Amino acid sequence: MRAIWKGAVTFGLVNVPVRLYSATEDNDISLHQVHEADGGRIRYQRTCEKCQKKVEWADIAKAYEDGETTVILTDEDLATLP
């Protein structure tokens, strides 16, 4: 592990070398889902669960469900929220 900072602390005539190390280290690797047969990346499509049609980003809205009904919110509704 490499030190992220090197320096010294001085107490009168005593000089103590100091090295600073990160407390954590990122060891994550990025994995992708691929088709086992040919290695092609797997993508997800936006589909409506009611009509099973593909939905474009422009046709997607935000909604709130209170248990019985679904209330679709507009951009103006979202702008008024604190």
Image (cartoon, rainbow, N blue to C red):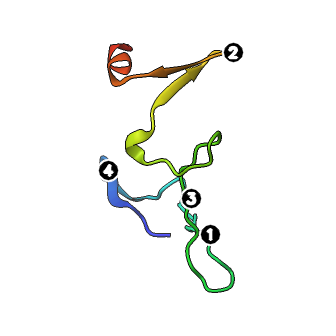
How far apart, in angstroms, are the residues tagged by discs 1 and 3? 11 Å
Q: Which mark is residue 15?
A: none
For marks 3 and 4, the one nearer the N-term is 4
Residue 69 appears left or right of 24: right
**What type is the residue that disc 2 sits on?**
Glu
**Numbered disc in front, either 2 or 3:** 2
Mark 3 sits on what residue? Answer: 44
How far apart, in angstroms, are the residues tagged by discs 1 and 2? 36 Å
**Numbered disc in front, either 1 or 4:** 1
Q: Secondary structure at mark 2?
A: loop
Q: Quadrant of residue 32?
A: bottom right
Mark 2 sits on what residue? Answer: 68
Residue under the image location 47 percent in, 29 percent down: 62
**What type is the residue that disc 1 sits on?**
Gln
How far apart, in angstroms, are the residues tagged by discs 3 and 4? 59 Å
Q: Which mark is residue 10?
A: 4
Residue 18 appears left or right of 30: left
> Is the residue under label 4 in contact with that under label 3 (CB below 8 Å)?
no
For marks 1 and 4, the one nearer the N-term is 4
Q: Position of residue 77 (x, y in %)?
A: 37, 16
Q: Secondary structure at mark 3?
A: loop
**Numbered disc in front, either 3 or 4:** 3
Q: Which mark is residue 33?
A: 1
For marks 2 and 4, the one nearer the N-term is 4
